[in-house]
Amino acid sequence: MTREPTVDETADTDAFTRRRALAAGGGVALAGLAGCTALDVATGGPAEFAAGTATVADAALDESGYELNELTENTQTREFDVAGSTREVRVTSTIAEYDKAVELFGERYQAAVFAVLTTPRVEVLGQALNPVGELDDEERAQLIVDRYEGVSDLERSSEYTTDVLGTDASVTVYTAEGEIGGTGVSVALEFHVSEAVEAGDDYVIPLAAYPEAFGDGENVRRMLNGIEHEQNDED
């Protein structure tokens, strides 16, 4: 994570800092989990699966203070040998990333993160395959842990249920120690990790992280409750 520029710094520097605050590589890592299961594609050309988009409603953003940082797509291609022929499977996922500045040590940092991963519900020959939804709680937590440096002592803290896209979703809360990049100081962190929620032809996984002292749990719930899903019309 990177310190938010002062008001005297340029707009270009501000944009650069926001991009650095949520490392682009983290989004790629999230999307890369989709399609990693060997698919039984028996016949035909490339099989393509594209997710819709899950974002947070403006009203929830206004109440929670988060802002959209980036909305990205990521396409992963896998090839499989089937009956002596090579079959290609392409899976496109979307990631909506939000962030929020917090004050620590007398400075402001883009240290609070909320991300929503949307990945297709891949089905081949009548068999539903859910490589993301089958991750356990701790594996899903690792999707957001990489937003910070030197994270250690990840421990399950509590669990609650809240509405995500009309479903009572189970959300696991973890605590850990980690460093906000550039500070050299370790802080207690809190992670909120939702189970995968079915939305039309997609799976949606919301994830959140922030310094524990910031106490942003209620705002995270507002964001979870405010998620909206738009199906990919090209399917």
Image (cartoon, grey):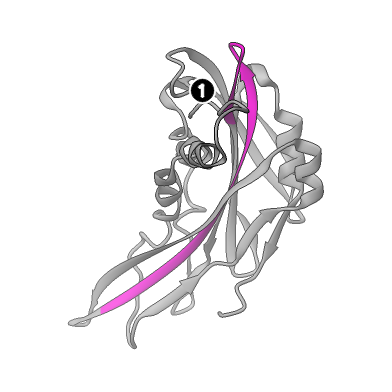
Task: Give the magenta range.
Answer: 87-111
* In this picture, residue 128 sits left or right of residue 225: left
**For mark 1, what is the residue?**
155
Q: Nearer the viewer, residue 109 or 153?
A: 109
Quadrant of the image occupied by residue 218: top right
**Above or below for 157 versus 70:** above
**Above or below for 198 versus 169:** below
Placement of the C terminus among the 4 image quadrants: bottom right
x 49%, y 42%: residue: 19
**Above or below for 133 versus 15:** below
Say whether residue 107 is magenta: yes
Quadrant of the image occupied by residue 172: top right
Which x, y percent locates residue 120?
A: 52, 66
Callout 1: 10 Å neighbours few (<14), some, many (20+)? some
Q: Amino acid at mark 1?
A: Glu
* In this picture, residue 199 sits left or right of residue 74: right
Disc 1 secondary structure class: strand
Which x, y percent locates residue 115?
A: 58, 45
Quadrant of the image occupied by residue 192: top right
Which x, y percent locates residue 112?
A: 60, 31
Q: Nearer the viewer, residue 165 or 8?
A: 8
